[in-house]
Image (cartoon, rainbow, N blue to C red):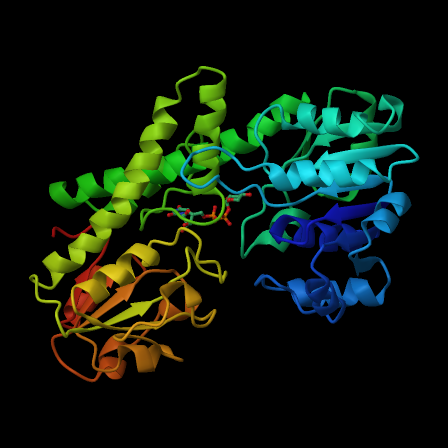
Amino acid sequence: MKMCMIGTGYVGLVSGTCFADLGNKVYCVDKDQNKINKLKNAISPIYEPGLDDLIRNNFKAKRLDFTSDLEKAVKDSQLIFICVGTPTKKGSNLVDLSQVFNVAKSISKYIKSYKIIITKSTVPVTTGDQIEKIISRKVKKSLFDVVSNPEFLREGEAIRDFKYPDRIVIGSNNKKIFKKMELLYEPLIKKGAKFFCTSRKGAELIKYASNAFLATKITFINEIANLCETAGINIEDISVGMGSDERIGSRFLRAGPAYGGSCFPKDTKGLVSIANKFKSNLSIVKSVIKSNQNRKILLTKRVLKIMNNKIKNKKIAVLGVTFKANTDDMRESSSLVLIPFLLKKGAKVSYHDPSGPKNEFGKKKNLNFASSINKACLGADLIIINTEWDEFKSIDFKKIVKKNNFKIYDMRNLYNPIELEKRNIKYYSVGRSKL
Ligand code: UDX
């Protein structure tokens, strides 16, 4: 099929490239000409393992093209995917839909034959209705349908998630669309993906409810981890014991620092604001948001306890600063609370992240990016593991710190406390050691 993805951010670029890889002809459209030029040279603006190669191969095979010519892309495509950002409005929980509505206005100028307009951006319930209204100001209703097809890609696993999804959700008020969308997704359905059709508003809500549920699951286990710490119980045992119940499931039951990223924080807030609009009180989601915000502070302040309130001039190494492993994304990462706190308390912080140095911290006197784990940890008084990158999972700390009496604060529970105790290393983790 011929299609265009409007917006070459995370969702647009990954899904566009993967659709091309399935044999479709795909245009990825972006206003930013600089981005387009780089993409033509297979330089991806986002960090996603495997994506550059997939872009290169499909571009060479002429299934994938990059352009800023929206008119040509719309005219040449049967399917038009809206994949632009839907950030939170500053100072509120409301979703900023201006980019989505601008795209709707722009494409309406170029629709001269029948098109299916598909929203992949995460958008609040009734956004499809509003897109339809905007387009129908310029285009006859018989010339287009607006469909919701939310995306469930995880950063760092996006290609795998696209190719092997648990489910494909299509929301449309016109039942004829379902067959066409089934055809598009046939290769994935054949591999076992569930194809689920519902109303347009239903699909819009499925996306928010899914993300809010996963955020709730994480927040739940994080609070149970707090209880484990005071009760002297191992949180991993609880995760395994609970997760073995198929009704609960073992995934997203890993205790750690507060959840972060571009989706969970934004979508939980977005869901609350949608519910408010419909005069429905989502008290659970509200308390998840609050609990997660508190957790960033709670885990950060534990450093004081671990260091007996002596942080000034101490050398602290932070391993991993992104919101999770296999991404360069800093959005809502707990390190954005942790590192400024350590600096404020007078620590000398050296951080290492496999995705490179970060501008988000600004230039600070006592903060430096170390180009390796060894350089970050050399002479450290405390090592904080903030992100679960594979490279942090089997470090010989004694060998690289080269000093006695250093401590480890492992926020991702990557190490076995008994093993480290045997080696006389003072080790603190989450949901297993009394602090
Ligand atoms: C999420 C959803 O999983 C995805 O379906 C949606 O499309 C976008 O949002 P992503 O933000 O890439 O994906 O990250 P995810 O892997 O879900 O992790 C989100 C946060 O939860 C991270 O901070 C991660 O560290 C944390 N997390 C995840 C835990 O703390 N414990 C877990 O068990 C799982």
The reply, left or right, for residue 133 in relation to residue 350 is right
- Left or right of 199, for residue 281: left
Residue 152 lies, in percent from the top left, at 58, 41
Does 298 sit above or below residue 172?
Answer: below
In the depicted view, which residue is nearer to us: 280 or 427? Answer: 280
Residue at left offset 73%, top offset 55%: 17
The answer to whether one can see residue 379 in this image is yes
x, y percent for residue 313? 14, 74
* Residue 421 position by quadrant: bottom left
| Extreme residue toward the top, this view | 279
The image quadrant that residue 230 belongs to is top left
Q: Residue at x 25, y 38 (%)?
A: 224
Q: Quadrant of the N terminus?
A: top right
The residue under the point 92% across, 35% down is 112
Q: x, y (%) of residue 218?
A: 37, 40
From where the camera sits, is residue 178 visible? no
Q: Does residue 283 appear to the left or right of 167 in the view shown?
A: left
Q: Quadrant of residue 358?
A: bottom left
Q: Position of residue 175 (x, y in %)?
A: 79, 20
Residue at position x 88%, y 28% in the image:
143
